[in-house]
Image: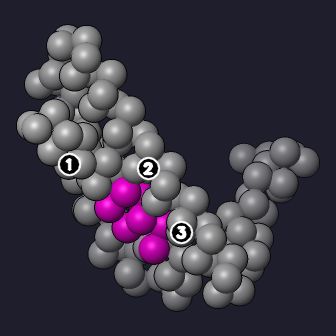
């Protein structure tokens, strides 16, 4: 790969995010943003697919597969020295599943 300016900027983004999130308050706020975004995404996907009543099993398989990918990446993320990516992946997974499950309970009542 060539060392272009864009590659240098994009390559430095993730380590600089980890340095930025070293502060506990920033770390917590980043986790809250990821959790809330994932909750909104899970809630909106199930609402839209449920209201359209179209491709329900396929969307369920896709969401389960994406969640399983995050679970399978967890041991690799645990071996890293910086735990930010592990916490972000867990927050994403938990927020998404919480949104899906809460939307399921809402439709049951």
**Which residue lies under the disc numbered 2?**
38
Task: Give the number of the mark in front: 3 or 1.
Answer: 1
How far across and how far down the image is residue 75, in percent? 30, 75
- The kind of secondary structure the magenta stretch mainly shows is helix
**What's the mark number on residue 101?**
1
Find the magenta span and give its range: 87-95
Q: Residue furthest right?
A: 5
Q: Is residue 18 above or below residue 54?
A: below
Q: Cα distance, mark 2 to mark 3?
A: 10 Å
Q: Is residue 11 above or below residue 41?
A: below
| Mark 3 Cα shell of 10 Å, populated few (<14), some (14-19), many (≥20) | many
**Which residue lies under the disc numbered 3?**
31
Q: Is residue 63 above or below residue 23?
A: above
In the drawing, does residue 94 fall left or right of residue 11? left
Q: Cα distance, mark 3 to mark 1?
A: 20 Å
Q: Residue at x 33, y 22 (%)?
A: 48
Q: Closest to the observer: 10 or 54?
A: 54
How far across and how far down the image is residue 89, in percent? 42, 64
How far across and how far down the image is residue 86, in percent? 44, 73
Q: Is residue 64 visible?
A: no
Task: Give the number of the mark in front: 1 or 2.
Answer: 1
How far across and how far down the image is residue 68, in percent? 22, 53
Q: Quadrant of residue 59?
A: top left
In the drawing, does residue 90 fall left or right of residue 34? left
**Residue 89 among those drawn in magenta:** yes
| Mark 2 Cα shell of 10 Å, populated few (<14), some (14-19), many (≥20) | many
């Amino acid at each position: 790969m060539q060392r272009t300016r864009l590659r240098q900027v994009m390559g430095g983004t993730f380590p600089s995010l980890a340095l930025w999130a070293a502060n506990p308050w920033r770390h917590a706020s980043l986790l809250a943003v990821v959790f809330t975004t994932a909750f909104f995404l899970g809630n909106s996907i199930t609402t839209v697919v449920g209201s359209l009543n179209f491709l329900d099993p396929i969307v369920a398989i896709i969401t389960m597969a994406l969640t399983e990918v995050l679970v399978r990446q967890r041991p690799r993320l645990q071996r890293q020295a910086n735990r930010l990516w592990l916490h972000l992946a867990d927050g994403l997974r938990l927020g998404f599943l919480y949104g899906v499950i809460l939307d399921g309970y809402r439709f049951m009542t």
